[in-house]
Image (cartoon, rainbow, N blue to C red):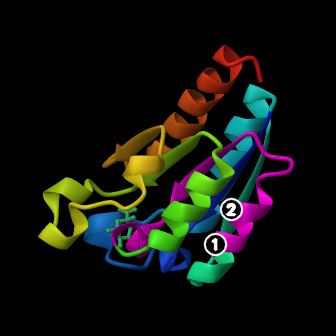
Amino acid sequence: VRILVLHGPNLNLLGSREQSIYGTTTLDEIDAAIAQAAESLNIAVDTRQSNVEGELVTWIQEARTGYHGIIINPAAYTHTSVAIRDALAAVALPTVEVHLSNIYQREAFRHHSYIAGVAMAQLSGFGPAGYLLALQGLLEHLLEQGT
Ligand code: DQA
């Protein structure tokens, strides 16, 4: 099993960015925890971050070959990007949407996700643990499917 984890814009600033909302864990620390979980689950996981919408679209398209599922925190593109939604719909890989914060507790413009409609599941509000929960849930789903 091989899973692609994508982090969207401004998530490279985690640790210093709006600490009261996103906490003090850095993206490197999150990626290290994901790598450790992948190792203990005996699966392959690649993590990538981009501030560029088109780059995320290209990586999603490329995941068609070689990956069984996607975990994505689209960050602000959650609320704006038809292109990322369409890319996920096109590749049709099981996808889990992750948000560190609970987007439904925040400003109204964060309450709508373009991604949710094409995602298998959404985790919002668990902080960095959301990625690990997503990994576990996605893996169980893939194994049930016979991947
Ligand atoms: C976020 C929530 C988004 O609304 C915001 O634009 C982000 C991060 C989260 O992880 O809580 O950049 O996706």
Residue 26 % position (x, y): 54, 67
Residue 8 % position (x, y): 53, 71
Task: Give left or right: position of 65 versus 116.
Answer: right
Residue type pointed to by label 1: Leu
Q: The magenta stretch spans which residues?
A: 56-79
Q: Nearer the viewer, residue 45 or 84?
A: 84
Residue type pointed to by label 2: Ile
Q: Nearer the viewer, residue 51 or 128?
A: 51
Indicate which disc residue 60 carries: 2
Residue under pointer 1: 56
Q: Is mark 1 within 8 Å of ligand 1?
A: no
Q: Is mark 2 within 8 Å of ligand 1?
A: no
Residue 107 visible? The answer is: no
Q: Is residue 83 above or below residue 118?
A: below
Spatial CA span between label 2 and label 1: 6 Å
Q: Is residue 41 above or below residue 69?
A: above
